[in-house]
Image (cartoon, rainbow, N blue to C red):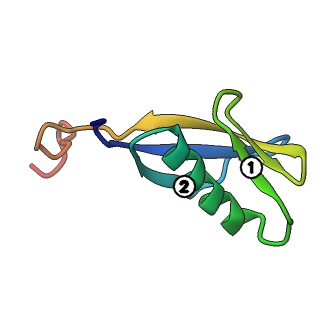
Amino acid sequence: MKTRKKLFAVVQPIGHRPYREHADLHFRDNTELAAQLTTYARSKWPSPQKVAVDIHAKQIIVDGTPRANFSLHEYRDHGGQTATLPGVGQ
């Protein structure tokens, strides 16, 4: 049985800057990953007829045309500590 991975995806439409809100993902295999990214892409491109995700090329394809690239990232673990800056809060 595969373990679930918790990552987030940064989506960047081709020729534009990345979206501020990222896609929170919690998946077991590439099929679940593609399904979750497709759901996210439908929120960004609601009107098209067909939305597909190419996991290997890391592209979101809308109506047969690549519209965005995405990258997967792990959440940072602070080791149970809050980040403190020197000289702040003293």
| Residue that mark 2 sits on | 36
Label number found at residue 52: 1
Q: Nearer the viewer, residue 42 or 15?
A: 42
Tag 2 or tag 1, which sits nearer the N-term? 2
Residue type, mark 1 in image: Ala
Relative side of 79 to 20, left or right: left
> Spatial distance from mark 1 to mark 2, Cα to Cα?
11 Å
Whether residue 36 is situated above or below residue 7 in the rendered picture: below
Q: Nearer the viewer, residue 11 or 66?
A: 66
Residue occupying image coordinates x 23% and y 38% = 77
Residue pushed farthest front? 1
Label number found at residue 41: none
Q: How many marks?
A: 2
Residue 7, quarter of the rendered image? top left
Q: In terms of secondary structure, where does tag 2 sit?
A: helix
User: Where is residue 78 drawn, in percent x and y?
Assistant: 20, 38
Relative side of 39 to 26, left or right: right
Q: Residues within 10 Å of mark 1 (few under 14, many from 20)?
A: many
Q: Nearer the viewer, residue 81 or 76?
A: 76
On-image quarter of the N terminus:
top left
Residue occupying image coordinates x 70% and y 65% = 42
Residue occupying image coordinates x 45% and y 50% = 25
User: Where is residue 85 drawn, in percent x and y?
Assistant: 22, 39
User: Where is residue 29 drawn, in percent x and y?
Assistant: 45, 39
Residue type, mark 2 in image: Gln
Q: Are marks 1 and 2 in contact (CB under 8 Å)?
A: no
Q: In terms of secondary structure, where does tag 1 sit?
A: strand
Residue pushed farthest top? 56
Residue 87, quarter of the rendered image? top left
Residue occupying image coordinates x 54% and y 44% = 31
Q: Residues within 10 Å of mark 2 (few under 14, many from 20)?
A: some
Relative side of 55 to 15, left or right: left
